[in-house]
Amino acid sequence: MLVKSSGIPVMPSIFDDFLKDWSLSNYSDTNTTLPAVNIKENENEFTVEVAAPGMDKKDFKINLDNDILTISSEKTSKNEDINDKYTRKEYSYQSFERSFNLPKDVIVSEKITASYKNGELLISIPKKEEAKPIPPKLIEVE
């Protein structure tokens, strides 16, 4: 691309944030949507929260393979409006895939649960008993 120079130094404008296309701010370099993810840990489990509004629980695929948790989703929609004077067709395709390495020998894979409610996918990953912290023990002095 050729650009004609005006001799004025090129500097970021404070208006760049106002003029940028905000609809593209949640996309990866491959133009796939990337939902926000929070990962929490407490003494009993790991919790993964995925913000994915507008999806259905049937749209998600959750896979655990060799301590790698993969969350993916795919959704297609098609709207058509045919009238005497016009035809309107809209197609939409959304997909994402996120993978996370889980700690080895820490989780109980058979007890992982997932639920989807109010636009949030919640995955609970319980820890093995031996991976849970041992509470401090008070030793009496005799």
Image (cartoon, rainbow, N blue to C red):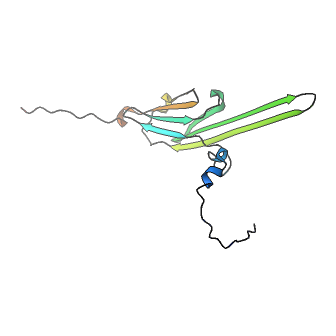
The image shows a total of numbered marks equal to 0
Q: Residue furthest left?
A: 142
Can you tell which quarter of the image residue 1 is in? bottom right
Residue occupying the point 60% across, 59% down? 13
Q: Residue at x 11, y 31 (%)?
A: 140
Dividing the picture into quadrants, the one containing residue 87 is: top right
> Would residue 46 appear left or right of 60 to someone viewing this image?
left
Q: Residue at x 50, y 36 (%)?
A: 48
**Rendered location of residue 119, percent (x, y):** 59, 30
| Camera-side residue of 73 and 23 | 23
Q: Position of residue 111 (x, y in %)?
A: 48, 28
Left or right: residue 142 compared with residue 101: left
Query: Up-down: is 11 above or below 95?
Result: below
Return the x and y of residue 124 as percentages of the image width and height.
48, 31
Question: 36 and 140: which one is in front?
Answer: 36
Which residue is more in the foreground, 89 or 110? 89
Residue projecting furthest to the bottom: 7
Above or below 104: residue 110: above
